[in-house]
Amino acid sequence: MKRLLAATPAPDADVSLEAITELDTAGATLLGNWLGVERLGELVQQQNLTPERRALLETLVKAMGRPQPEPPPEPGRITQMLEFLGRNSQSLGQKWWLQSGFIGLVLQATLGIMFRPARWRLTALVNQIHQTGFNAVPIVALLTFLVGAVVAFLGATVLSEFGAEIYTVNLVAYSFLREFGVLLTAILLAGRTASAFTAQIGSMKANEELDALRTLGLNPIELLVIPRVLALMLTLPLLTFVAIISGLTGGALVSLVSLGIPLDQYLGILADVELRHYLVGLAKAPMFAFVVATIGCLEGFKVSGSAESVGRHTTSSVVQSIFMVILLDALAAMFCMEMGW
């Protein structure tokens, strides 16, 4: 049919619409494109057609004869920037709102099983503690040991200009007790554990295992999320302690080799550091763990069902977790500074 109507007929050609036996909107559109809107309108008025066919063709002519609207003007750069800012602000607000709702569901499910020991998932909890805690000890210890050595070396390099190399010990102690110990551990777990949570739950979502759990009457949050959140909240303070010890050990090694500070003097200076600095750093660990775990689990539930979606949400969980950890640490540092802690 399209080959037959490929060439537009001459203006004086005899075209009869009365011989058409069947006609629908697709065929009428094809006639309009072949004859042109004005020619088709003239033929409709001149020829004897049934009322139904005349109404169809007149509606088509009226619709195709409408002038095309002019394209809107190209927005300026300022308008584009404001549009980009508004769109991203709206997306960020939606993520915050969704994250808040998910945290509420987790807290509700936790309170629901708190006084029901029969519903505790102890096996899953122990398994998650092993995966998120004990398996992470080597990498946490190695990373913080190297960072402690670097901090001590850089501090000694600057303080040596003032003849105050001995204060390198205080620099390493304060930085790791208050900030670096918990911050480096939380960032490491944000990349290691949050991504694992997202990939695990996302793969279950893609394989429709979550739907199977709901069909069996099981709550995925109670079964999958709560053990992971509790495990991370238990292991992050312990890993923070390991990070602090490893960082102080790296600082002690640099102090002994480069600064000539003996180990007994190093430990004597550490003994004079107030306990509150250690408690301030350790108090942030459960908060960081809760945020990292909930973000990782929520991104897993967002997976749409494809492998590409799993990878995208895994990357998103790592980025969001690291961002939230640094943001909360900055807010906690300002709060402690204002409180004089």
Image (spheres, rainbow, N blue to C red):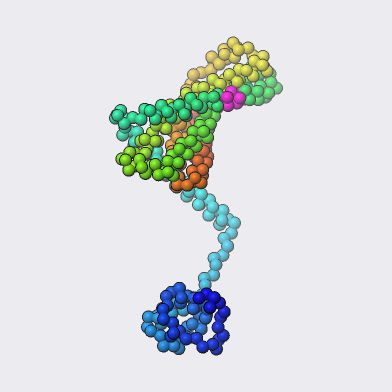
Q: Is residue 325 visible?
A: no
Residue 160 in percent (x, y) is at 69, 21
Q: Is residue 76 visible?
A: yes
Residue 144 covered by magenta stretch: yes
Position of 278 relative to 208 (above/below) = above
Residue at the spot 58% in from the left edge and 26% down from the top edge: 143
Quarter of the image where one finds residue 9: bottom right
* The residue stretch that appears in magenta: 142-148
**Figure disc tally:** 0
Residue 211 covered by magenta stretch: no
**Quick one: 7 or 292, which is closer to the camera?**
7
**Quick one: 330 or 125, which is closer to the camera?**
125
Left or right? Give the position of 265 relative to 135.
right
Residue at the spot 47% in from the left edge and 86% down from the top edge: 16
**Quick one: 306 or 181, which is closer to the camera?**
306
Residue at the spot 57% in from the left edge and 13% down from the top edge: 267
Left or right? Give the position of 63 relative to 248.
left
Residue 226 in percent (x, y) is at 38, 33
Position of 263 relative to 79 (above/below) = above
Left or right? Give the position of 306 relative to 115.
right
Residue at the spot 30% in from the left edge and 28% down from the top edge: 117
**Quick one: 34 or 170, which is closer to the camera?**
34
Is the stretch drawn in magenta largely helix, strand or loop?
A: helix
Residue 157 in percent (x, y) is at 68, 23
- Of all residues shown, which one is farthest toward the right? 161
